[in-house]
């Protein structure tokens, strides 16, 4: 959980910087078409495969026309490529976390995997347009080290492999 100045923070886990303590699948505190940007970094994979569509519909509901949903999720294609290259050696146990979650509390389990075609399809199915990759370096929150900057080996942003699939789309 990272604090990004200027953002309203929604999380089911209580922390001092959380503005709305609830699950992000229920944005009932937000009116229809009231939000310009939703940023969800390594959140969507915590919902089951039969829940993801409803979560995305909820996000679509609260976004204004022209609003952007910016999503970061573990990139299953990158996980598979690194596994094919390295296996599950001690130095690459991070692969297990990308697939299964950190498992530090009852909410920290991954229930679904994403690659670019699948996440793009889900976004378009809901009605989002102009689905594209986004680069964490060129966002207003680039200075916040969150999972959109997930590299293996850990923190090797120059020579490591980006393990986060970062997609955004417009309502």
Image (tube, rainbow, N blue to C red):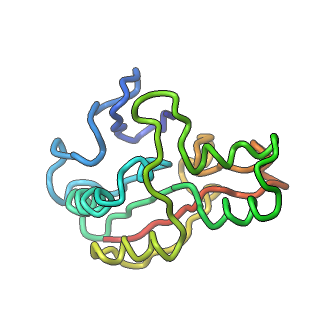
Q: Quadrant of residue 133?
A: bottom right
Q: Position of residue 137 (x, y in %)?
A: 65, 56
Residue occupying the point 36% across, 59% down: 49
Q: Looking at the image, which residue is at 61% across and 56% down?
A: 164
| Count of marks, rendered view | 0
Q: Is residue 71 left or right of residue 163?
A: left
Q: Position of residue 2 (x, y in %)?
A: 51, 34
Residue 168 percent coordinates (x, y):
46, 66
Please report the residue visible at 22 percent of the width from the left and 46 percent of the height from the top: 27
**Up/down of 145 relative to 70, above or below:** above
Relative to 136, residue 170 above or below:
below
Residue 28 percent coordinates (x, y): 16, 45
Of 36 and 99, nearer the camera is 99
**Residue found at the very far top of the displayed protein:** 16
Check the picture and name the quadrant holding the C terminus: bottom left
- Taking 162 as reference, is 124 left or right? left
- Residue at image position (50%, 64%) is 114
Relative height, residue 124 to residue 89 (above, below): below
């Amino acid at each position: 959980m990272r604090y990004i100045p200027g953002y309203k923070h929604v999380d089911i886990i209580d922390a001092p910087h959380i503005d709305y303590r609830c699950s992000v699948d229920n944005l009932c505190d937000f009116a229809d078409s009231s939000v310009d940007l939703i940023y969800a970094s390594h959140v969507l994979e915590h919902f089951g495969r039969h829940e993801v569509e409803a979560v995305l519909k909820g996000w679509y509901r609260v976004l204004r026309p022209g609003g952007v949903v910016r999503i970061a999720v573990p990139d299953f294609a990158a996980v598979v490529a690194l596994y094919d290259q390295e296996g599950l050696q001690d130095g690459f146990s991070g692969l297990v976390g990308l697939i299964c979650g950190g498992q530090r509390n009852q909410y920290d389990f991954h229930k679904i995997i994403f690659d670019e075609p699948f996440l793009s399809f889900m976004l378009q199915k809901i009605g989002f347009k102009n689905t594209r990759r986004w680069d964490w370096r060129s966002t207003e929150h680039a200075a916040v080290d969150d999972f959109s900057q997930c590299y293996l080996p850990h923190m090797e942003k120059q020579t490591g492999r980006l393990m986060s699939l970062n997609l955004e789309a417009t309502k």
